[in-house]
Image (tube, grey):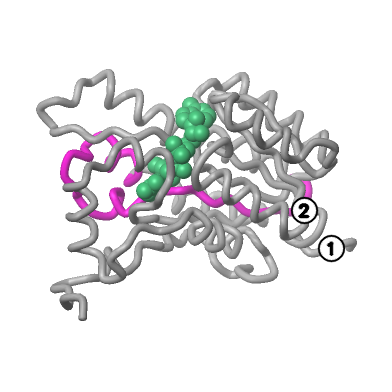
Amino acid sequence: MADRKGGGGSAAIVTGAGSGIGRATGALLLSRGWQVAFVDRDAKGLEEIAAQNAGNARVLVRTLDVTDEPAVVALVADIAAAFGRLDGVVNSAGIAADKHVFDTSAELFRRVLDVIVVGTFLVGREAARHMAKSGGGAIVNVASVSGLRGSKGRSAYGASKGAVINLTQVMANDLAPHGIRVNAVAPGPVETPMVKSLHTAADRALYARHTPMRRYADPNEIASVIHFLLDESQSSFVTGEIVAVDGGYRGAGIIVDPA
Ligand code: NAD
């Protein structure tokens, strides 16, 4: 065997890779010797990544809407063929929705579920078909603490992340016989373009008040946990697990005032 899965030469697809957590994860995987397909609906971030990695044969950059089933089926097959293998998938594509339940239309609710739940399902399912043929691999879904707790204004987003958490557990169960591990990270607030456009100063104060570590994560702090969960040499017996990466938010009761 040339390498252990998750070591040098292994290949991963990262969705939502043009920005934020996905982009940081793709860059970390590259730095650890992986081949990485950066996939996103939006071409802008991908163009920068392509320019930064011009001539690097370990990098593929592709536009994809993860809700488009025929496009997902075709692109995952193309990427697996181009790399000659597929060992990991990171589902980071997502959209935010922060509205009171009275202001949440069925259209918005369906759109959020389509991108976050159906997209995560489709990319994971197609990648798993290829990984199953070559001895297995790992899937990491990017959930959220909003899928674990009832955060205000998060009916559509929270429901979608709750669904991703259960989907992670079901896929871990179905795919274990095929040598595929499926886990999720559940970040608290992370300094990404999504949050910069969404969180007001009042939101930031609220999060700080409820988070023992009193700050937002850097995207690299989420990427390193995703890498751990992808890497067979580090997490070979971890599957169906939801890892909160949240500065203590989920576990906290009454918070000690800053010194
Ligand atoms: P981001 O907006 O910086 O990146 C998300 C990327 O997903 C964008 O590049 C966007 O173009 C892409 N995308 C959206 N819809 C898509 C589609 N249909 N097909 C393909 N790509 C699509 O946001 P981020 O903060 O990096 O978020 C990444 C993931 O992390 C999301 O699932 C988000 O819900 C989750 N998350 C973020 C935070 C946070 O505080 N930033 C916290 C918890 C969970």
Q: Is the CB–ligand 1 distance for label 1 below 8 Å?
A: no
Assign a secondary structure to mark 1. loop
Q: Quadrant of residue 58?
A: top right
Dot 1 corresponds to which residue?
A: 3
Q: Quadrant of residue 181?
A: bottom right
Q: Quadrant of residue 249?
A: bottom left
Dot 2 corresponds to which residue?
A: 10
Observer-nearest residue: 85 or 97? 97
Q: Is the CB–ligand 1 distance for label 2 below 8 Å?
A: no
Looking at the rendering, the quadrant in which ligand 1 lies is: top left
Label 2 packing within 10 angstroms: few (<14), some (14-19), many (20+): many
Q: Earlier in the sequence, mark 2 or mark 1?
A: 1
Tell me which amino acid carries mark 1.
Asp
Tell me which amino acid carries mark 2.
Ser
Give yes or no for contact between labels 2 and 1 (Cβ–Cβ under 8 Å): yes
Is residue 189 depicted above or below 65 in this figure?
Answer: below
Query: x and y percent of residue 28 in the render?
Result: 64, 55
> Residue 156: within the magenta?
yes
**Magenta-highlighted residues:** 133-162
Query: x and y percent of residue 129 in the render?
Result: 67, 39
Observer-nearest residue: 231 or 169? 231
Query: x and y percent of residue 250 in the render?
Result: 27, 64
- For the point 72% across and 33% down, the residue is 50
- For the point 80% across and 36% down, the residue is 54
Label 1 packing within 10 angstroms: few (<14), some (14-19), many (20+): few
